Image: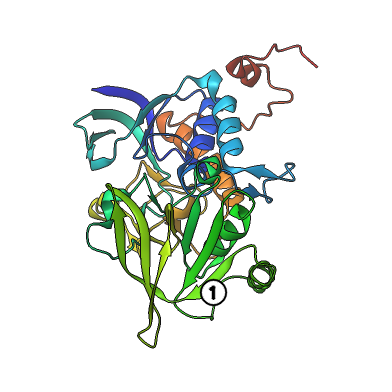
Amino acid sequence: MKTADVLVIGAGPCGLFQVFELGLQGLGAIVVEALDQPGGQCAELYPQKPIFDIPAIPEISGAQLTQNLMRQIEPFKAQFCFGERIEALEPRGERFWLRGSRGTEFDVAAVVIAAGAGAFQPVRLKLDGVEAFEGRQLFYAVKDRAQFRNRDLVIFGGGDSALDWALSLVPEARSVVLVHRSERFRAQSALVDQMHELCAQGHMRFVAGRASSYRQTNGDLSAVELADSEGGKQWLEADSLLVFFGMVPDPGPVKHWGLAMEANQVQVGTERFETSIPGVFAIGDINTYPGKKKLILSGFHEAALAAFAIKARLEPGKRVHLQYTTTSPLLRRRLGVEADRD
């Protein structure tokens, strides 16, 4: 049985910043993350893509943001449980009992759900048996662009991610072919224009069609068959397939915990970001309230207010004072910073 003041479900940017805000209040946290690493969608879907709307940071990648947040929460020595998904939550008196997918049990005084929109699953390529190549020659996200250097790539999709990665990988790959079911794209027009320009220059190709079959040689995927809308077919040699058909969110077990929900999102009040179950809070993309905006910045704000509310819940009758890290000796001690440092 693992114990702490608070259990945070999700190690994305909002969940990690929640640990920081809890730490400033003197509260210890356990973080449970279904993925095998921190960062959530930032680390899983776009670790090397730039983010431009973090205050005071003009540009930062998803991986860098995760690293910075992990460094920021080091003084608070949070417990992390990666590769585990919370499956059961049960109020027990003034505390909560939770069970993870690996059988780990938790006993905490409060819970913060920071699980994004839930567990995202990619929309997969629908070819019998092709899943055998996942992680080896079939990919639904780019984690290390270097692995595609000097490779023949076939990229599927018509949205921003497909075009963005096609354009980005042209300098790395031996060849790049973008495949979409039609010439009508969901991507930004600027990306479509860049793609057509690179095609005109002979740096990449675009084919309107869909995958209908594949071929393997000596156990490796070696080519993919494309069918167009008129029934024509062609084969493309390929070392790797990158598929960007989008992601499907699933809140998972959260929807079975008796929380008030709206369209798979947890309803909260904006004063405390507490759910319909007292002591259970929700921040980030998993929650909903009037005027909700799904921004990392908004999630950071929600984490701060939730931390104050949790502190008040755990110490009823005591006033929770607002203190500043620039001047508070107590907060500086918790951060491991000398109190008299300028």
Q: Residue at x 53, y 81 (%)?
A: 184
Q: Where 323 sits versus 261, above or below?
A: above
- In the current view of this chain or complex, which residue is farthest to the left? 103
Which quarter of the figure has residue 211?
Answer: bottom left
Image location of residue 275, percent across then percent down = 38, 51
Image location of residue 314, percent across then percent down = 41, 30
Left or right relative to 334: residue 130: left
Image location of residue 339, percent across then percent down = 71, 13
Looking at the image, which is closer to me, 10 or 341? 10
Q: Secondary structure at mark 1?
A: loop
- In the current view of this chain or complex, which residue is farthest to the front? 218
Q: Residue at x 55, y 26 (%)?
A: 73
Looking at the image, which is closer to me, 37 or 77? 37
The residue wearing badge 1 is: 186
Q: Residue at x 54, y 74 (%)?
A: 186
Residue 212 visible within the image:
yes
Q: Amino acid at mark 1?
A: Arg
- In the current view of this chain or complex, which residue is farthest to the bottom? 230
Looking at the image, which is closer to me, 207 or 252? 207
Q: Residue at x 63, y 33 (%)?
A: 322
Left or right relative to 200: residue 21: left
Residue 122 visible within the image:
no
Q: Where 309 sits versus 178, above or below?
A: above
Q: Quadrant of the N terminus?
A: top left
Looking at the image, which is closer to me, 337 or 95? 337
